[in-house]
Image: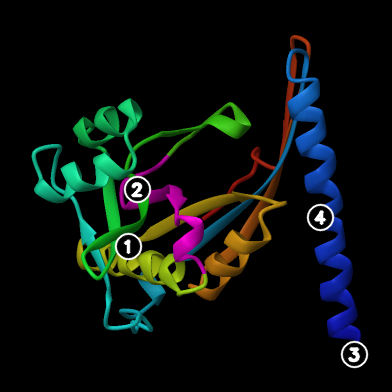
Amino acid sequence: MISRYKKIVNAWRLYRFGIIRIAINKYFSGFICLEKFILYKYDLRNKKLLESQKREAVCIHKLKDEKDELFKKFHQKFPSKEFIKRIQDPHKTCYVALINEKVAGYGWVASKELFIDSLNYNFPLEEGEFFIFACYVPKENRGQGIYPEMLREILNDGIKRGKERAYIGVSAANAGSIRGIEKAGFEQLRTVRYLQFLSMKKWAGLEKVEA
């Protein structure tokens, strides 16, 4: 009963914060920005290959470059110039989820320093580390376990490549992504807060990020 009460309270806090943050960032973006970000880690050194829980129709593919036929198919569904730049970056990799050969989601991995837009911050990465970012599953494909499965596939690929640690971050107001991240086995590392007011910028929670 107490556990259920805590979940309700936490859900309400996330919802309330999300409404406040969205309102502030939308209507006062010219001079103020407020973000609360949860940073997660996954220690690949202490984990075995993760068992897949996907349906038979779900497949996750790692793209090679912009000449990859699947990338062309992916880019037709999600036409963004930013994706062209990313796929050409040797330190970034794209993973695409397919359901019955149709694109049903994607996720990106950075193996070098990653700029996190919402925090206006360059997150440093050491050798053996990578950061999962910009994951997305269209509304019509949600609720099918695609996001956790995509994370498991990315982590398994990291283990096979000898990586030691993975990071992922999410807005504290994004309850759906938080569930998917924790379901995949990530452990919460830090809660990061970013405030920009006119020319003043302040971060909290990034000073002592530890592996």
Q: How is the image coloured?
A: rainbow
Residue 92 in sight here: no
| Amino acid on which the number 1 mark rests in the picture | Ile
Direction from residue 58 to residue 120 in the image, left or right: right
Q: Do the residues labelled 2 and 3 touch (CB within 8 Å)?
A: no
Secondary element at image label 3: loop
| Amino acid on which the number 2 mark rests in the picture | Val
The label on residue 1 is 3
Give the residue at x 21% y 56%.
62
Q: Are marks 1 and 3 in contact (CB under 8 Å)?
A: no
Residue identifier under label 2:
109
Give the residue at x 17% y 42%.
72
> Label 2 to label 3, Cα distance in Å?
39 Å
Q: Give the range drawn in magenta.
A: 125-142
> Label 1 to label 4, Cα distance in Å?
29 Å
Residue identifier under label 1:
154
Crowding at label 3, few (<14), some or many (≥20) Cα neighbours within 10 Å? Answer: few
Residue identifier under label 4:
15
Q: In this view, does 192 lie above or below 114?
A: below
Q: Nearer the viewer, mark 1 or mark 4?
A: 4
Crowding at label 4, few (<14), some or many (≥20) Cα neighbours within 10 Å? Answer: some
Mark 1 or mark 4, earlier in chain: 4
| Amino acid on which the number 3 mark rests in the picture | Met
* Residue 132 magenta-highlighted: yes
Residue situated in front as seen by the camera: 92 or 140: 140
Secondary element at image label 4: helix
Mark 1 or mark 2, earlier in chain: 2
Mark 3 or mark 4, earlier in chain: 3
Quarter containing the N terminus: bottom right
